[in-house]
Image (cartoon, rainbow, N blue to C red):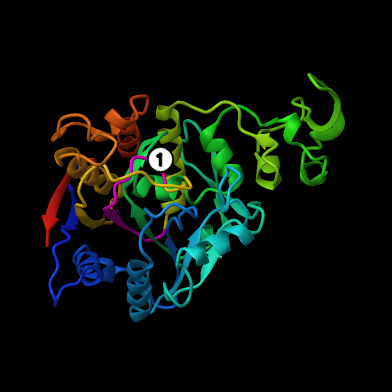
């Protein structure tokens, strides 16, 4: 297989080349202008950051990308799908407030925000996954499924379940609706935490399979009324998790890192099929864990640069290699050891994860290649 081209720029700047300009330069060098943007709806997919976490991509970069898309004739909007966990991005109202708080709005980011899977995470389309081993259909937020073009802006960092988060995770996991995220994380069905249930009846009302009912349940504290799931009817769609505002309907058993990464690759394949997709990774503030936490620990390596490609597999592999080649920072979580130059930082941080399998599987199903040529501009 022919090597894919990955374009890279470091973070050294000058008066003529501030960082936002260098990002645009690397995007242009990687061929973003070859996409036909005229009158096309362009989903700029990014993570808006859980409030309290400051490791997310700065809105300044996003504003420049939006300006570039408009200059090329496109109609850009910023988007992300709601979270599976109960937090400040689990529904569109809170999600929009969080995006606004972190600077993703018409003023700072020069673009409007559309939450991809709607108010309660229930607005999605099912896209077929060709020859899917783990999933047959990807449940993708409608605002992303309906886009003509996707530009993925990804903060490259460690991740406690996948090893690292980059372009593939931003698309495969980030574009999934709440029900899709349920499918990605677990092969088991939801459970109800009786102590958290408020008997609000929302899950009962909206279950499409008549699988949830309010009934009396024996607990250590006596009899309590709670929602309960009839597993003879439940199909594991995760709709109750999407709707529950009290963290009562939850995922109990998580898939292994290998299965999760493979499912992310399958979702990515379905999402990017038959539409132009362009990827930019920001290898800076490389925090050890996901931006979904309400905090971010110190970066594990020095800021490295910005990379872009049409191939998300090659791009993620190149970014992983750059992080592995870098020394660790004494202020970061790995700082108490030797410099770890040339060691797999992601495995050191999260020994139970296997990010390599995700890239191998993505290559196997035809999303891209791990073989790349790194072109520095």
The answer to whether 114 appears left or right of 330 in the picture is right
Q: Residue 221, relative to residue 53: is it above or below? A: above
Q: How many callouts does the rendering have? A: 1
Q: Position of residue 255 (x, y in %)?
A: 50, 27
The answer to whether 189 appears left or right of 209 in the picture is left
Most foreground residue, 58 or 113: 58
The answer to whether 371 appears left or right of 364 in the picture is left
Q: Which quadrant is home to the N terminus?
A: top left
Most foreground residue, 220 or 156: 220
Graded by Cα atoms within 10 Å as few (under 14), some (14 to 19) or many (20 or more), the crowding at tag 1 reads many
Q: Secondary structure at mark 1?
A: helix
Q: Position of residue 278 (x, y in %)?
A: 33, 59
State the residue position of label 1: 265
Magenta-drawn segment: 275-290
Q: Is residue 210 magenta?
A: no
Q: Position of residue 97 (x, y in %)?
A: 57, 63
Q: Is residue 286 magenta?
A: yes
- Residue drawn where x is 61% and y is 32% of the image: 251
Q: Which quadrant is home to the C terminus?
A: bottom left
Q: Position of residue 183 (x, y in %)?
A: 56, 36
Residue 367 sits in which quadrant? top left
- Residue drawn where x is 17% and y is 57% of the image: 8
Does any portion of residue 135 appear in the rendered image? Answer: no
């Amino acid at each position: 297989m022919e090597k894919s081209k990955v374009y890279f720029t470091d973070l050294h700047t000058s008066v003529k080349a501030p960082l936002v300009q260098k990002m645009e330069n690397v995007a242009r060098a990687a061929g973003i202008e070859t996409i036909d943007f005229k009158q096309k709806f362009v989903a700029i997919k990014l993570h808006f950051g859980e409030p309290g976490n400051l490791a997310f991509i700065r809105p300044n970069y996003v504003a420049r990308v939006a300006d570039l898309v408009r200059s090329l004739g496109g109609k850009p909007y910023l988007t992300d799908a709601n979270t599976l966990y109960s937090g400040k991005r689990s529904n569109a109202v809170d999600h929009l407030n969080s995006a606004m708080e972190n600077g993703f709005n018409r003023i700072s980011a020069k673009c409007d925000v559309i939450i991809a899977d709607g108010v309660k995470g229930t607005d999605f389309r099912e896209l077929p996954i060709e020859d899917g081993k783990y999933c047959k259909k990807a449940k993708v937020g409608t605002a992303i499924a309906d886009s003509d073009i996707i530009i993925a802006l990804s903060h490259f960092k460690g991740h406690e379940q996948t090893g690292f988060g980059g372009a593939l995770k931003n698309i495969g996991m980030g574009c999934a609706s709440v029900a899709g995220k349920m499918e990605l994380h677990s092969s088991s069905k939801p459970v109800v935490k009786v102590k958290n249930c408020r008997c609000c009846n929302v899950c009962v009302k909206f279950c499409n399979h008549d699988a949830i009912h309010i009934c009396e349940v024996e607990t250590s504290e006596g009899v309590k009324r709670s929602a309960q799931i009839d597993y003879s009817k439940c199909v594991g769609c995760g709709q109750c998790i999407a709707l529950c505002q009290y963290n009562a309907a939850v995922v109990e058993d998580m898939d292994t890192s290998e299965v999760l990464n493979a499912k992310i690759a399958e979702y990515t394949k379905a999402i990017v099929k038959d539409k132009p997709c362009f990827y930019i990774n920001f290898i800076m503030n490389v925090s050890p864990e996901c931006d979904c936490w309400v905090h971010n620990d110190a970066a594990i390596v020095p800021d490295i640069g910005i990379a872009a490609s049409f191939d998300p597999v090659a791009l993620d592999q190149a970014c992983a290699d750059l992080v592995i080649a870098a020394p660790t920072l004494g202020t970061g979580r790995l700082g108490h050891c030797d410099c770890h130059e040339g060691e797999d930082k992601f495995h050191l941080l999260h020994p139970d994860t296997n990010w390599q399998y995700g890239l191998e599987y993505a290559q196997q199903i035809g999303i891209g290649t791990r073989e790349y040529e790194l072109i520095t501009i």
